[in-house]
Amino acid sequence: MEINKLVDFNIFRTAPELTKSQVKTLLAELEVKVYKADWITIGIMAPSDTRAKEALKSISRKYSSIKFGNLDSIYADGSVFLKGNQKTGNVFIRSENGLGEGILITCQYDADSEESNTFGPLPLDFFT
């Protein structure tokens, strides 16, 4: 399947490989949504805690308003699921087998009338 829009990711359990052109197009679409959101939550499925933390750090480098506090103090063995909340700055990680691999970005809103939307799974190197 050709991936041209964020909605195209909805059928994937693990992140597909993308060309540089696809990343550029999809990043432009995602940034519009991220900047409109009041805050985001990030879920990262990765083969190790190191890879998950690297992916989260790449997002913080890309967006200076997205920072997390306790990255150096969290650890988990094997495949992991990491969750970061921009609003609180908290990050949690747990070991979890059977997951795919990739980054999930959920745009959150303060107003109840706005519905949150999750995009991904994006490749772990999507923001580098």
Image (tube, rainbow, N blue to C red):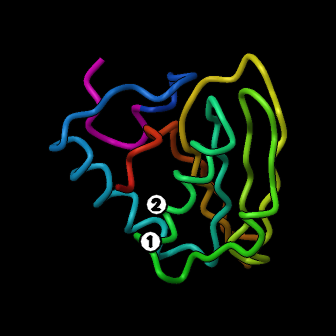
Q: Is residue 16 above or below residue 35?
A: above
The residue labelled by disc 2 is 58
Q: Residues within 10 Å of mark 2 (few under 14, many from 20)?
A: some
Residue at 73% x, 16% y is 98
Mark 2–mark 1 CB contact (< 8 Å) = yes
| Residue 37 sits in quarter | bottom right
The residue labelled by disc 1 is 61
What residue span does the magenta drawing correspond to? 1-8
Q: Is residue 3 magenta?
A: yes
Residue furthest bottom as drawn: 65
> Percent x, y for residue 67?
62, 76
Q: Report helix, strand or loop for mark 1.
A: helix
- Magenta span: helix, strand or loop, mainly? loop
> Percent x, y for residue 35?
46, 76
Q: Amino acid at mark 2?
A: Ser
Q: Report helix, strand or loop for mark 2.
A: helix
Q: Is residue 19 magenta?
A: no
| Residue 69 sits in quarter | bottom right
Name the side, left or right, on which 33 lies relative to 100: left
Quadrant where the N terminus is found in the figure: top left
Q: Residues within 10 Å of mark 1 (few under 14, many from 20)?
A: few
